[in-house]
Amino acid sequence: MGHLCSMRVTQLLFLLPAKSSALSTVSSTVSATLNALYPAAAYNARRQEARSAALATSTIKSTEGVPLAGDASTYGEFDLSFFAELLQSASPKPGDTFLDLGSGVGRLVVGAALLHPDTWSNCHGIELSAPLHERAIEARYAFEELPSPRPPIAPCEYTCGDVLGVEAATALGASAVCFSYAVTWAREKGAHTALSRALASSLRPGSRVISIDLKLSNEIAEEENRHFALLHQLEGENAETGACTGWVYEVRSGLREE
């Protein structure tokens, strides 16, 4: 879910002990678990709920006065296999935190927590839409109701707030790996603008950022005496968009070397 309007921040943190499990042996279990929590048959219902939530808070109206959601509130669900590959390329380390910017109903927050249960100290999702934020919490509770044995999972946290606002700065400052599938956010010259500024001003050097289909802007980052060093460019598939590109960056201090 994209950028809509600012609202009060609410948080919920799930802390559970993680058990050891190799990524190669847990992938099929992760997929089955996510399918149980987010059934494919209910995908259109989730999209409709996202659209309804966007329309309810929209300040954009047609000439006839009909509320419009706008491109920035487009809802999407990313391919799990490609997501797992991108996460691996970001080299998560024990104690790192994961942050999904515009996390919607929390599917990739849970996905990250299941893919690397022994690695993350926390998997965090920030979502502006209160109804989607609530669905993320419901799904996380639903995980506890799945039949045993359930797969190990890292701690999960959910914040309802503006990912481009001041309330997200603390979460960004604590994160080691950020993921953004918000391809409809503000852009210029084929690169994220507002997102690049928020990341450059708040992320610590050494943090990694995964951006889908839009590059980050070093021109903007250099205003904060930072630059985004490209680590990997991966090509993959996503059911919603077809072929897509994942850009994996590391945040570094100073200006780029020419």
Image (cartoon, rainbow, N blue to C red):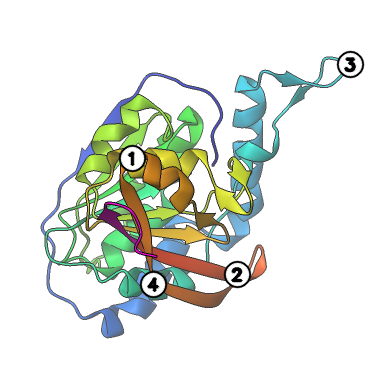
Q: Position of residue 154 (x, y in %)?
A: 20, 58
- Nearer the observer: mark 3 or 1; the answer is 1
Magenta highlight range: 250-258
Q: Is residue 8 above or below residue 209?
A: above
Residue behind mark 4 = 84
Residue bearing the label numbered 1: 224
Q: Is residue 118 above or below residue 55?
A: below
Tell me the amino acid under the disc marked 2.
Answer: Cys
**Mark 4, other Cα within 10 Å: few <14 / some 14–19 / many ≥20:** some
Based on the displayed image, in which of its 4 quarters is residue 177 positioned?
bottom left
Q: Residues within 10 Å of mark 1 (few under 14, many from 20)?
A: some
Q: Quadrant of residue 248?
A: bottom left
Task: Look at label 3 and name its amino acid.
Answer: Glu
Viewer-nearest of discs 2 and 3: 2
On the picture, is 109 further left or further right than 155? right
Q: What residue is drawn where x is 15% and y is 54%?
A: 121
Mark 2 vs mark 4: give the one in front. Answer: 2
Q: Tell me which numbered mark, 3 or 4, is placed earlier along the sequence.
A: 3
Rounded to the nearest whole Å, what is the CA distance between mark 3 and mark 1?
43 Å
3D distance between C-alphas at marks 1 and 4: 30 Å
CB-based contact (under 8 Å), mark 3 and mark 1 = no
Amino acid found under the numbered disc labelled 1: Glu
* Residue pictured at 34% horizontal, 74% vertical: 89
Q: Tag 2 or tag 1, which sits nearer the N-term?
A: 1
Above or below for 229 versus 73: below
Q: What is the CA distance from the residue labelled 3 to the residue labelled 4?
A: 45 Å
